Each structure stands twice: as C-alpha cells, then as structure tokens.
Amino acid sequence: MHNAAVYLLSSRKKLLPICLKKLFENWNYKYQYPVFVYFFKNTYNKNFINNIRNKISNKIEFIEIDYEFPKNISANELFFNRKYNRYVKEQFPKKRQGYLHMEHFVTNITSFGKIGCVSKELEKYDYLMRIDDDSNFYSKINFDLFNSMNNSVFSTGYTWNNFSWRQECTRENLWNFYKEYLNEKKILPKNKILLQAIQNNDEMQMHKLKWSAGNLNIYNMKFFKNDTNWLHYLDKLNKFAGDYKYRWGDIETIGLFYYTFFEEPIYDYDLINKKLYLNKFNNELSSTAPSTNFSLNVHNFFLLRYFYKLKRIFNNK
C-alpha cells in the first residue's frame, strides 16, 4: 500500500455512480485508496452523496469547489469567443465554459486550496491518480496501479498520438509558448523527439509525441510538489492562461513539461490493449463534460452538436 489517493472532477450525475462502482469492483476493492470527487457548486446534493457513499464506499469524499475566469485576460480572449476557430464554431458554444474551468483544474495538480483547484486535503499524499467520471475500469486489474511510482514520476493508463483538426484547434499557440519558455530558461528538452522538433522548428513533431491518457494519469507528488522547474512552469502556464484562451489541456501542458526534463517516455500501463480499461462508457452521456451552466443537459448538448453539424454541411455546399 502507498500513501496515495484518487481524485476526479465530476458533473455527470448518471455516469458518476457507474464509474465509482467499477473503480471499486475492478480495482480499488483490494486497496481501498481514498477517492475525492470534486464538483462545481450545486452539482450534487447531500442525498446523492450519501447514496453513493452508502452503496459503494465510505472512502469516497465529495468536495465542492468554486471557479473563476482569470483576471489578466479579457472576455474576448476566452476560447468560446474565438469565432474563427473551427472547433469553437462547430462544437464549443459559450455554454461549455465549464470545460475551460475543468482544464484549469486538471493542469493545476499542485495548486492546493486555490480557487478552482484541488483542495488542501490532497497535499498530504505522495502519489495521486486523476481519472474522469467516465473512466471505465471494466475488467479486474489485479495489481496496484501506484506501484509504477516506485521508479517513475509520471505514469498513465495508456498513451496515444492521434492528430487531427480537433487537436490543431485546441493547441493554438502552444508551440510558440513552449519555444519561448525554453528560450527564457536557456534549456533544451531531454526527450530526443522533442529535441529534434525544437532543432528543426517542426511543430508537427511535437504533435506526434506519445501523450498520456489524461483520464487515468498517476503523478509522483513527492517530485511535483518540490520541483522548482515544475512550479515555475505552472506559474508561466497560469499567467499565460492558455487553458482559458485556447482550451489547452493537461495532456499537452504536463506532457511537454515531462518531455522537457525527462528523456524516457511516460510510463504506459497499456490498459486498453490489455482489455482492462476504456476511456469512456458506451453511453451518450460520456459526451458531456463538467459544466457551470446546468441548462446544458444531455438533450441540449446533442441538439447543439446536431445543429453545428448541419450548419457545417450547408456552409460547405
């Protein structure tokens, strides 16, 4: 057993009980690591919380958190106002603003107790696993996922490196930000692929890195809490506010940090190929995301997506 915990940010009321049930049935029944469910205000009431704790485990804690937009950027800079961006035009109306708060939450893994971030309760743990409320532990995992932390700083349930217009639309200016960061620090990345990308000024090589799952990431907090390079890098990220301006995610931002200071790949459990884990449930509810606008229910979300799809078809005629 390790000094470790699992945490997630959740807003999907129908998915969360299924996710937590599978998490305990197929893995955590053996270890009973504490699980912290964070949620934006008014998402879950006491009856809902008590029902989950009674039916699944009293090791599950629910923590309500607040949120705010960064004060150092204007409203026009927020991602959902970038109407030139294809992803915004087709799939990211203002009603999805909660997704930007989510990206801020998952990137700030050491911002204990700050608005919109993990709480002080997590600061005492040596290792943390972040999952999503549609993380699907669908088969028995008969080993401790935290064991990788004995020799690793960062591990993941699986890796991927797909690149399409969606990634292009949500990584705007990331390459320029990263190059400026390296110039300021007067360093070069230790990972050979990323180093070659910098030397050739080849942004596409960056996109082809193997990225972590995101929905099952494990962090060695003994490193992250005390590493001055990470703390400086996170401060730069927050001041630039790429999560709010361009919808940058933790997968890319934390991944780039890791590949800068570590030569070896992220430790990959390869759980999808081993048929132990899926990144979602076969359910349309997996398509919704944490939101601060509760009028964006599942029905409205799919109507919006259908509307934007039709709009794209007619615009292309």
Image (spheres, helix red, strand yellow):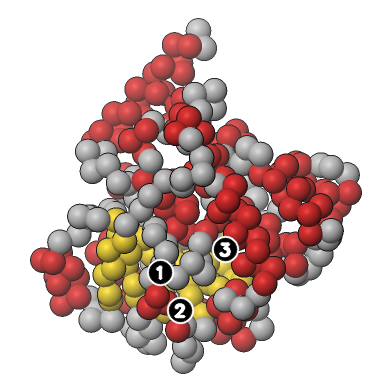
In depth, the one of 185 and 267 nearer the eye is: 185
> What residue do we see at 79% from left, 59% from top?
185
Quarter of the image for residue 154 reads: bottom right
Measuring from the top left, give residue 106's x and y in whole percent: 47, 59
Residue kind at label 1, given as amino acid type? Gly
Marking on residue 123: 2
Secondary element under disc 3, as helix, strand or loop, is loop
The residue furthest right is: 199
Which numbered disc flags the more N-terminal residue, 1 or 2?
Answer: 1
CA–CA distance in space, label 1 to label 2:
9 Å
SS category of the residue bearing label 2: helix
Amino acid type, label 2: Glu
Q: Is residue 106 visible?
A: yes
Note whether residue 206 is visible.
no
Residue 296 is drawn in which quadrant? top left
The x and y percentages for residue 214 are 52, 59
Q: Say which of marks 1 and 3 sits in front.
A: 1
Identify residue for label 1. Answer: 113
Q: Is residue 17 left or right of residue 118?
A: left
Residue at the (66%, 83%) spot, across then down: 151
For this rendering, which residue is in front, 182 or 51? 182
- For mark 1, does the 10 Å Cα neighbourhood hold few (<14), some (14 to 19), or many (20 or more) residues? some
Q: Is residue 86 above or below residue 198?
A: above
